[in-house]
Image (cartoon, rainbow, N blue to C red):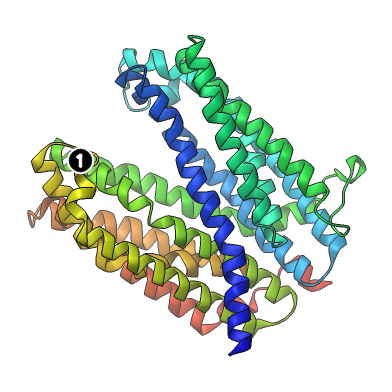
Amino acid sequence: MNRLKKDTWCTLKLAFPIIIENTLQTLLGTTDTYFAGQLTDTAIAGINITNIIMNIFIAFFTAVSIGTTAIVTRSYGKKNYEKTNKSMVQSIIIGFWLGLTIGIICFIFYKQFLMVSKTPKTIIEYATPYYFVVAIPSIFLCLQLILSSCLRAVKDTKTPMYITGLSNILNILLDTLFIHLGYGVLGLALATTLSRIIGMLLLFYKLQRHDTNIKFCKKDFVADKKLIKTILTIGIPAGAEKLIMRIGQLLYNNMIISISVTAYAAHNIAGTIESYSYIPAMGFGLAASTLVGTSLGEQKIEDAKKYTYISYLLSAICMIIIGAVFYIFAKPLASLFTTTKETQLFVASVLRIIAFFQPFSALVQVMTNSLQGAGDTKFPMYSTLIGIWGIRLGIGYLLAIPFRLGLKGVWYAYAFDLVIRGLILLIRFYNGKWEEIIISVDKK
């Protein structure tokens, strides 16, 4: 019992700062939207265009982050600090060149990206300055994500939380200043990018001074092709999984638009409300990823399993509570976002559907992260492909259009996807195939 309490506390200690960090990230993401709303509705639309584009590129940054976590946790668990430092350095090198490349692509093809959805010229006028200042210097966001992953991989989840908090405060102060000075959308973009630059520099500074075992200097920044290949081999399927999800969501949204404008508005509102339920699941999922990786590095497979199940149980408890809130307060929550009665009814009805499936949402998140932490990144990618493209899009279309269930049909398909994907991932974890995965640090 004492060991169980200790393991539970260890999980909570890692997860809680991540939950706070994710909450702060969510608030940071809404800050520019709020201040843009003080300008015009068109300004909000302009910022949203850039955010949609950036969400696609974040899938590539995530690939490096997950590859980093899998390798750094394993070497840190083995107390192979030389390999830990080397893996971090290689991840930073990849992040630098990836961020730079994405920035160049964003610069060269900016017209094509901004016009991809046949965006009206009035929105383009607002989107262009924001895009140039936020999307082109995406190297800072890329490095920020990778440096945070490095710190979490060595069981430091507090530093990213504190730095995210500081970035959030700085972003709000700069937003207020630039809006007051009359910079408009350009000012909001400058605030976002400057806060990211400072956040990245602080993360790099703290990583170098984490403890006596984590040390690297200029001479260490030499590319190791073999290690870079290992990071990318593990990370690319994880990035592909995010990309599959993003593209699937775009097609999913197009299908909902075809139902009705009211249904689309209700779907977006319900999605915004439900997104807050992901925060604890992501926190416990990332904690599980770190604990699984370090446990495998220590060659303690049973500990890896135990931490995963503890993470799921804690996450499920949080999600059940959130589900109860969704069900009981569905109408009041809907009324916070819209005054239209018909839209409120749509939002309330789908929130009450998904309320019962929150434990499965936790299952998907925790099992995905645990498998990725073990280096098993391909299986979650395949399960996402089946879930998003086969169930959400395929069955969602059948229920919504031919069976005339409309928006409810779409959300029934979403719930079914969570159940099937959660069970598939649980079976994969339970059968132990991930235990057989050997990465570079295991060979030495």
- The disc labelled 1 sits on which kind of residue? Tyr
Q: Position of residue 240 (x, y in %)?
A: 50, 52
**Mark 1: secondary structure:** helix
Quarter assignment of residue 317:
bottom left
- For the question of whether residue 148 can be seen, the reply is yes
Q: Is residue 221 above or below residue 352?
A: above
Q: Is residue 198 above or below residue 252?
A: above
Q: Nearer the viewer, residue 152 or 103?
A: 152
Q: Is residue 128 above or below residue 331?
A: above
How many badges with numbers are in the image?
1
Q: Position of residue 236 (x, y in %)?
A: 58, 53
Residue found 30% across the figure and 60% down from its top: 390
Position of residue 66 in the picture relative to residue 367 (left or right): right
Q: Nearer the viewer, residue 262 or 99?
A: 262
Q: Quadrant of the N terminus?
A: bottom right
Q: Quadrant of the C terminus?
A: bottom right
Q: Position of residue 435 (x, y in %)?
A: 62, 79
Q: Residues within 10 Å of mark 1 (few under 14, many from 20)?
A: many
Q: Position of residue 342 (x, y in %)?
A: 8, 42
Position of residue 232 in the picture relative to residue 51 (left or right): right
Q: Residue furthest bottom?
A: 1
